[in-house]
Image (cartoon, rainbow, N blue to C red):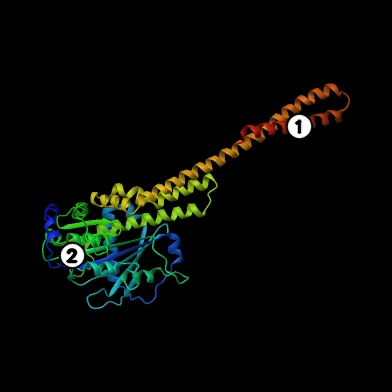
Amino acid sequence: MSSALSQLNTSLVAPSPSATVIPTFVLLFAMTPEAAAQAGTSLSGLQLISDETSQSHRSRMESLQRHLFGESYSQASRLQRTAVGRLSLPGRAGELTYADIFRGVHKCGAALWEVSLFGQPQPLDIPRWIGWLDLESADSPAKITWDKLATGRQGKASMPEMYVPLVVLRFRDGTLGELVERHAPDLVTLLHRDASGGRFKASFVSAELASDLCRSDDGLWMIARNGAIDVSTHSKDTQESQLPRDALPLLLTLEVLCLDRAVLRSYLDRFAQRTYGTVDELIQLRREIFDDLEEYYGTLAKTHSYAADAIARGESLFGIDDLFEAVEDRLEALTFEISTRNEQSINRLGLWLTTSFGAIDVGFVAASVATWYYKSNLYAVLGWTVGVTFAAALAIAGLLRWKIKP
């Protein structure tokens, strides 16, 4: 990438003909467990994806997952992947005509939709591609697909907890440096899905290119709040493989980030809607959080360095670190609340125990005095003892309540 950066100033001055690339768009939609439960479980009007295609996709993703995150993580089967179907799109000539839909369900119930849209070789057309990815445009492939996926049982489509489009570009007519030299501002505009029509500063474009997370000379990975881009001039895949294998590490990284955010959002919602009143419930909640957030707690330290860097950057960009801190703060506040309630319960128990034993001690003293004074009247002794004991209990209880009153 050093040669690409050194040629950046030239690309900002002289426009050149658009390079021809092979574009693939992978749309990731994350849903919290609650939203996933409310969404429809079956989709009508879809064509079947062949078993060969489905099995090939699943095996490639699971193989890479095992390679990146370790055998134990893979064997835990935390994400179950299924092929949903192929959705036909009303695309015109040169546009996207169908979407292959896969669904992953996390063990906590969070859902992740993976939608692949394959384009034909074509010149870079950034404004049109940004329009395709616009989730607020009624006729965009992204909006049409999401409305199909998210229409719930009440017939309304909610918004996803997280929407991340991954743009995969394959350039066959030159080197990566040549592509960046000609289209560096265009790539950054596509990364941020900026439809304003303005041009970014050269310093901003350079900074984005410098954040490249790919370790290969012929590859470029960039992540932003609005999506991610994978650019490559070399691929080992055969012609039958539409989603290049060298794009899968970044795709799998984005899946982990989407799941992190969906799970964290779910816990924040649970804190707002549910009351945890006992220590046992708090212990169970902590256990669930550590288990459901294994991707956040454990995966980062076990990944290869390039995936770890991408995850760390994504957690900052997508607000996942902030969400995690919010969950930790709520958990600490809940711990303090439950501890305070337990302390108050212990204080109340101590109050009644002190009152009881104190009153009994006073009763014994009263009984001794009454026995000496009323030598022949047993009922008088009993009445005196009970009365003094009761009065002592009231006095002790009142004094203790006043002392421990907050």
**Count of marks, rendered view:** 2
Where 22 sits versus 256, above or below? below
**Residue at 42% over, 59% down:** 32
Residue tagged 2: 170
**Residue at 31% over, 75% down:** 89
Whether residue 66 sits left or right of residue 276 in the image: it is: left
Crowding at dot 1, Cα within 10 Å, few <14 / some 14-19 / many 20+, comes out as some
Q: Which circle's residue, 2 or 1, is located before the other in the chain? A: 2
Q: Quadrant of residue 385?
A: top right
Crowding at dot 2, Cα within 10 Å, few <14 / some 14-19 / many 20+, comes out as many
Disc 2/disc 1 C-alpha distance (Å): 90 Å
Residue tagged 1: 391
Q: Quadrant of residue 156?
A: bottom left
Name the secondary structure under disc 1: helix
x%, y% of residue 27?
A: 31, 65
Where 303 sits versus 379, above or below? below
x%, y% of residue 220?
A: 19, 57
x%, y% of residue 306?
A: 23, 51
| Disc assigned to residue 157 | none
The amino acid at mark 2 is Arg
